[in-house]
Amino acid sequence: WKKIVSDQKAENITKEKAEFRGFFTNIKDIMKKILSLVVVATVRDATLQGIRIFLPMLVVLKGGSIVKGGVILFAITLACTIGGIIGGKLADSKGDEKVLLWTLGISPIFIIAGLNTTGFLSIASLIIGFAFLQASNPVTTAIAQKKCPMSRSTVSSLAMGVSWGIANLLTTPVGFSADIFGLEKTLRVVAFLPWTVTAWYAATMIFSAKVKR
């Protein structure tokens, strides 16, 4: 470490510090453009992780086996993968914003139905619901890249990595809530989260219409 520092010239160190400050300025400018997308992605990922992590436990509480919980988890994960591929394809033909709003708006219907039913109907509803939910995953990344075409790698990490990390942190309060209010009740509340995005978008459109008038 001493050798590396001693070999550096003063002007090079100053230049490096300036570039490092520029990095944070660049991040600040990017976040202004894609903050809403990061929030949307976080809500989506929090819904996915909040339910998926505790789903095997819910299966066991309802009298099922750990094996059954694992099979359901595998089926949901597979559906999420396929949903993402289909969502990306639809976004190319129908438009990013339409696919984002429709998938987030439809997914809670099936997830809530899955949590409130049993047997094959419950499993099928959860698979469809999570497929719709994850269909928006490539869409948020694509929109972010279009907003910041000169910083595609950075916005991709923000729209995917940061939102995923925050969503995983939010599983902790879900666990606390499950201990206090019960797992089923907590997961039912989590299933409603995507509709907060729908409500926010509707409110934004109404406000914009009033401003134009």
Image (cartoon, rainbow, N blue to C red):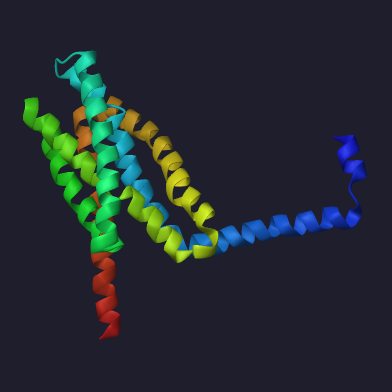
Count every numbered label the image shows and give the total: 0
Would you place residue 119 above or below residue 147 in this image?
A: above
Would you place residue 213 above or below residue 141 in this image?
A: below
Say which quadrant the N terminus sits in.
top right
Residue 111 in view, yes or no? no
Tell me which corner region of the image, top left, top right, bottom left or bottom right, holds residue 3. top right
- Left or right of residue 143: residue 200: left
Q: Residue at x 46, y 44 (%)?
A: 161
Tell me which corner region of the image, top left, top right, bottom left or bottom right, holds residue 54. top left
Q: Residue at x 21, y 46 (%)?
A: 132
**Residue pushed farthest bottom?**
213
Residue 187 in view, yes or no? yes
Q: Residue at x 68, y 60 (%)?
A: 22
Task: Give how far across and how far down residue 135 sits, in percent.
Answer: 27, 48
- Left or right of residue 64: residue 155: right
Task: Give how far across and how far down residue 44 sits, in percent.
Answer: 31, 46
Would you place residue 28 above or below residue 44 in this image?
A: below
Q: Residue at x 14, y 15 (%)?
A: 63
Would you place residue 94 above or below residue 40 in this image?
A: below
